[in-house]
Image (tube, helix red, strand yellow):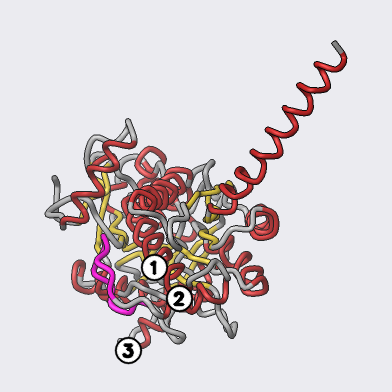
Amino acid sequence: MLRISRVLVAAALTALLAVLPWRAAVAAELVKIGLITALSGQSALAGQAISRGVQLAIDEINAAGGVLGGRELVLVRRDDESNPAKGVVAARELIHKEKVAVLFGGLDTPVALAIVPLANQAKMPFMDPWAAGTPITKNGADPNFAFRVSAMDELVDVAMVEYGQKTFGSEKFGLLMINNPWGESNHKGLVAALDAKGMKPAGSEKFDGDAIDVVPQLTRLRDAGADTIALVGNVGPSAQVVKSLRRMGWDVPIVSHWGPAGGRFTELAGPGAEKVHFVQTYSFFGDQSEVGKKVIAALKDKYDDINGPRDITPAVGVANAYDAMHLTALAIENAGSTDGDAIREGYYQIDTYPGLIKTYQSPFSKEQHDALGPQDYVWAQFIDNRIVPVGLSD
């Protein structure tokens, strides 16, 4: 009996040893893509959209044969809860433990700004599909490993001023900025954008992310003669601005960065949410390209809660992340490996890619790490809890 047991044990060990190299080979074939974003809290909807955009692109790339001669991509996600410290912890884990090839992240500018130095130090390509802070990509590092397929503050600020003038005849902008690095980035950009037009702000105010009353700041802007509010803040704070204006009875145009698009804005803001006009980089409403039609169909097929464009929200999260992942796959192919520095160079070698937002022509260079510009922006508002281009109700 003992002899039979020994034989069985030996056979089992032999079988196990035969399987282990195969399992190791399969694991080695995977190319990990890391994603750090807010998957909980007020901005969770935006984090979910980014995650879906990346995953949809990965599904397409894998179905077409993967990268580097058949290696499949796999997404490894971490929740930063919109907290820079938690984002840094997640980045270290994904870089050093999970050994990801590329790190996606940056729903919140403060989180992205905390991660970028780590990425540059580790020679880890960092792809930003949302956060718009100018210093994320213009960070002074050489070599610079931070890339972006999204809006950028200094360009959005110019667009905000031009949109206010064209749409509302704005002459005196009152600046209302969230009190964090993102707000600082946009305050600098808006002052510069106004100065380029020979204008100065009617006034400048800051408000905290947990503010529940912005009436004092808005009162000072009103008394200073502001005829338009230039707003920069995420979902919760921006909702408080709308509620404070309602309490004041002040009906003033609001031209906003895209913070309100990141979550439950209409629910939190209540009546008046539709008056906020904000920038976007894409909309699934209206006529769609063949890529747009394909993406809508794939989202409907993959996710039970998506039945059409009204359910793809915020659209920019899906669109930016989708294009960013496809561009990243091209960079990996150009690199011929998963070496971080080679992938960085691979981004510069991308020629033409017919994406969702646009057809990209040499989107990155050593001097330019932002693939989108003002010509790619769309102005939108909330209509019946749907983000739609301004002037398009359906």
Q: Is any atom of residue 160 visible in this view?
A: yes
What is the quadrant of residue 299 in the picture? top left
**Amino acid under disc 1:** Leu
Residue at image location 85% in from the left, 10% down from the top: 1
Q: Which residue is mark 2?
A: 346
Q: Are marks 2 and 1 in contact (CB under 8 Å)?
A: yes
Label 3 – label 2 distance at C-alpha: 41 Å
**Amino acid under disc 2:** Gly
Q: Which residues are magenta?
A: 352-363
Label 2 – label 1 distance at C-alpha: 7 Å
Q: Which residue is mark 3?
A: 198
Q: Are marks 3 and 1 in contact (CB under 8 Å)?
A: no
Counting other residues with Cα less than 10 Å from the Cα at mark 3, is it few (<14), some (14-19), or many (20 or more)? few
Q: Is residue 75 left or right of residue 362?
A: right
In magenta stretch: residue 142:
no
Residue at image location 26% in from the left, 60% down from the top: 356
Q: Is residue 393 left or right of residue 38?
A: left
Q: Nearer the viewer, residue 4 or 294?
A: 4
Mark found first going from the N terminus, 2 or 1: 1
Query: What is the residue that sits farthest to the right in this orientation?
Result: 2
Q: Nearer the viewer, residue 31 or 291?
A: 31
Q: Are marks 3 and 2 in contact (CB under 8 Å)?
A: no
| The label number, if any, that marks residue 330 in the structure image | 1
Q: Secondary structure at mark 1?
A: helix
Residue at image location 67% in from the left, 74% down from the top: 121
Q: Position of residue 48 (x, y in %)?
A: 44, 44
Q: Position of residue 354 (x, y in %)?
A: 24, 66
